[in-house]
Image (cartoon, helix red, strand yellow):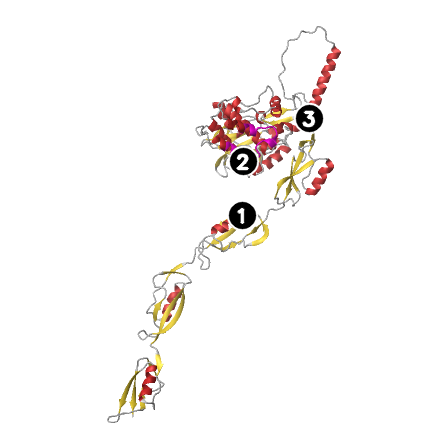
Amino acid sequence: MFVDTSTVDPLVGQLFDGRYRLDARVARGGMATVYRAFDTRLDRVVAVKVMHSALAQDDAFVQRFKREAKSAARLQHPNVVAIFDQGEDAGRVYLVMELVSGRTLRAVLREQARLELGQALGVAEGLLTALSAAHDAGIVHRDVKPENVLITDQGQVKVADFGLARAIESTQHTVADGTLIGTVAYLAPEQVLTGAADARTDLYSTGIVLYEMLTGVVPFTGDIPINVAYQHVNADVPAPSTVQRDLPGIVDELVVAATRRPPAERFPDARAMLSAVRRARATAGGDLSHHTSVVSLEDAPTTVLSLGRTAPAAGPSTLAKPTKQAKRQREPRRRRTPLIVAIIAGLVLGTAGAVGWWLGSGRYDDAPTFERLTQAAAQLRAKKLGIDVAIKEPSLFDEVVPPGTVLDQDPEPGDRYRRGSTITLTISRGPDRVPIPDVRGKTEEEGRALLDAQRLDVVLAPLEFSRDVPAGSVIEQNPAPRATRDTKPGTAVTIVVSKGPEPTTVPIVEGRPRSEAEKAITGAGLVAKVIEKFDDDIAAGIVISQDIKGGTSAARGDTVTLTVSKGPELVTVPDVEGRSRDEAKKRLEAAGFRVRFAEFPGRPGKTVIEQDPNGGERRRRGTTVTCFLF
């Protein structure tokens, strides 16, 4: 889009909402003006889209705009222009978005006319990747066109303006009064006929965009927008090879499958079309990374079409394809009856007016309110009103609306809808709550997986030493485990992960007194265990050995066994006085003593009359006991 920089924009330099400073106008479109701005709170450059004052004065638009902006802001994807904020400043409704450095697909097509096959399929792949993410989130774009497809300086495809078309549909610029919102070249038949749109509507528009990228032209053109709109209703989109003959058959099949007039005959969803594009692209290369100009986010205005005044004459149940009136030379009639001319003119005008009324507003009603009714009550009311309703799956969680109650409806209450069409109801599941799993004793990875599965945020506390929990496993958690579903998703659960036992150095205590050794062991964070042992060489109370070698590493709390000397082992000396020589020797040696016999001179003795040491005394084993014989 050409930007007239000579025009002074009164908003440039203003500070929106005390936060966003508008530095320069990037572009002006049919619904909004886009500015490069600076977020003074977060110190970043952003794009601010300010809606035109006519829209900002429409309460229905403002409320729908806020809802759609909030919904689109949840859509975080590399191929989607991120929504940061939305607000209202002095009656001016605005949207704060990611500022993309690059150019629109429209600007590229203006420069190149058409794209190479590999380039076109690459752009389509990026576009469909964004639509897949949006459709998964329940968001339909409704206005897919080259102006809303951006290509960054790095060649990445980004899609802008999710939800904006739906917000604009809540204004007086809707099908309710005989007008359509949209860029007519890319409208799906169902948008023309009923204003309805779902994921398959986006696929139709994507097919038209792909057709234009491949051929350099759109499939339907006309003198006035309404003629183009009704060609979408009454004619099939031709294969692009009818214009660009070197295109392969797989690309023709791709475009035709995406643009079939009945939605049920198109690709079932964006992922299915994305797979088809990738198959077609397997034999084509190319990218758009060489396009590095900065472009606007909205390059061309959305067109407002009148259905009531300019639609071609057609019956209420069929829409005739507009045709060009052939010019024929007629012989001028010399006489015309004024009355006949007046009657014919009246009939023509009356018929045209009736058809225009029917096509424009005659077949539309205001949607009744079903919100906050139970599902059963809503279905009963719909039956009484003769309205078809469908229940959207899956139902959605909501913090306020009770479970089993209508949370939302499409069309919304008061919106215009075609009589005989279906109103879709979304049922509340009530507040979203989850249990808190027990992750204690689990590895960190296992614990994270269990908490992630319940959509809980994991906060990792500093690691702690633990003798009881192995390194890498969870010691404790906060909040504690709860089996009941009473916790909000996103609640932070703090886990403490073990780094194993704390290491310490074992003291050297061999040869040291027992009390001193035990004090050194406990001082190192270890547990001392003492066993005593007789030792003939080491004095009693001295450490003989330790089972964990001194100077080595051990875990705090480990047990070190100390062997402490009891000194030499003492044995009670048997009393052998009065016993025979042989019996005395036998008893003493059995007790571990040595025996020496002493006899009186000249008298060989046979009986022990005295011993040294005396019986009952305690002596070390191996001590010699002297027995005196008589």
Q: Quadrant of residue 309?
A: top right
Q: Quadrant of residue 219?
A: top right
Report the residue marked by disc 1: 453
Q: 341 or 27: which is nearer to us?
A: 341
Q: Is residue 324 visible?
A: yes
Callout 2, which amino acid? Arg
Q: Position of residue 333 (x, y in %)?
A: 70, 7
Mark 1 lies on a secondary structure that is helix
Q: Which mark is residue 271?
A: 2
- Of label 3 and label 1, which has the lower sequence position? 3
Q: Going by the image, does 93 lie left or right of 502?
A: right
Marks 2/3: CA–CA distance = 34 Å
Callout 1, which amino acid? Ala
Q: Nearer the viewer, mark 3 or mark 1?
A: 3
Report the residue marked by disc 3: 317
Q: Going by the image, does 537 lie left or right of 339?
A: left
Q: Position of residue 70 (x, y in %)?
A: 58, 38
Mark 3 lies on a secondary structure that is loop
Q: Residue at x 39, y 71 (%)?
A: 531
Residue 467 vs 9, above or below: the answer is below
- Of label 2 and label 1, which has the lower sequence position? 2
Marks 2/1: CA–CA distance = 24 Å
Q: What secondary structure is the stretch in magenta mostly built from?
A: helix
Residue extending farthest left: 602
Q: 276 or 505: which is nearer to us?
A: 276
Q: Which mark is residue 178?
A: none
Callout 3, which amino acid? Ser
Count numbered badges in the picture: 3
Taking the magenta stretch, the answer to whether it contains residue 301 is: no
Disc 3: CA contacts within 10 A as few (<14), some (14-19) or many (>=20): few
Q: Which residues are magenta?
A: 254-278
